[in-house]
Image: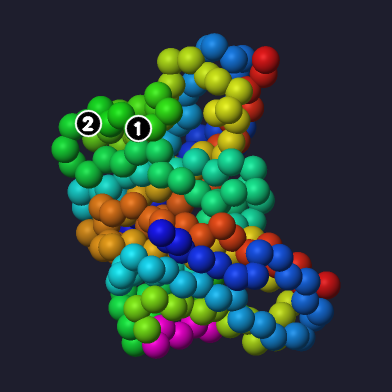
Amino acid sequence: NAGVTQTPKFRILKIGQSMTLQCAQDMNHNYMYWYRQDPGMGLKLIYYSVGAGITDKGEVPNGYNVSRSTTEDFPLRLELAAPSQTSVYFCASSYSQTNEKLFFGSGTQLSVL
Amino acid sequence: AQSVTQLDSHVSVSEGTPVLLRCNYSSSYSPSLFWYVQHPNKGLQLLLKYTSAATLVKGINGFEAEFKKSETSFHLTKPSAHMSDAAEYFCVVSDGGSYIPTFGRGTSLIVHP
């Protein structure tokens, strides 16, 4: 019973490099989310998806891209890493919106130097 | 539009004394409200949720919260703090307008022996 799996747990990037943060869930959830967490700022929504093939921007989408080719996977792509993207990234999923709890991955700590 | 305000960035209590973490929300619809807890270097875990049933909601580890529509509040309480309660707590609102969970900035609970 894996739940939401995020990889990698830690990563250091140089400015301008690219990478993909992986997220997979095995609960057949339709809704998936990417958040970033910065100290004292709570969690800010980057992108979300309501099902395979459907994605939409959240509050802070600039510098990121996502895709949702399957129900299980929701990768987050950083194309040209910048120091402002240094953060902890959380993937989450839920069965439905509004009144269902979110299941979170364990997070990815990313530093851009 | 929905929003949530956690009124204290830090709360410090002694072990065995009551805990009060304050949360006010704004919503144009009937909201669903949640409290999540994040222990150091961990993902987020649901403590409790309110979804228009009983206004007093009981959660895990002895926490509870009361939904007060007239005050637009959803404060989290616990009668007696334990050292293991030291963590970051997030209040979250989700309503029929956006269906996207919006997080507060978090309250850090410090428990002194």
Lateral position of residue A98 relative to residue B11, left or right = left
Query: What kind of secondary structure does the magenta stretch mostly adopt?
Result: loop
Q: Residue at x 40, y 24 (%)?
A: B62
Residue A74 coordinates in the image, percent (x, y): 46, 77
Residue type at mark 1 is Gly
Q: Residue at x 53, y 12 (%)?
A: B17
Lateral position of residue B9 relative to residue B92, left or right = right
Q: Chain of mark 1?
A: B
**Disc 1 target residue:** B59
Q: Which residues are magenta?
A: A65-69
- Is A68 magenta? The answer is yes
Is B34 drawn above or below residue A25 in the view shown? Answer: above
- In which image quadrant can residue A110 be found? bottom right
Please state the total of marks drawn on the protein image.
Answer: 2
**In the rendering, which numbered label is found on residue B55?**
2
Q: Residue at x 21, y 52 (%)?
A: B29
Q: Residue at x 41, y 59 (%)?
A: A1
**In the rendering, which numbered label is found on residue B47?**
none
Residue B24 visible in image: no
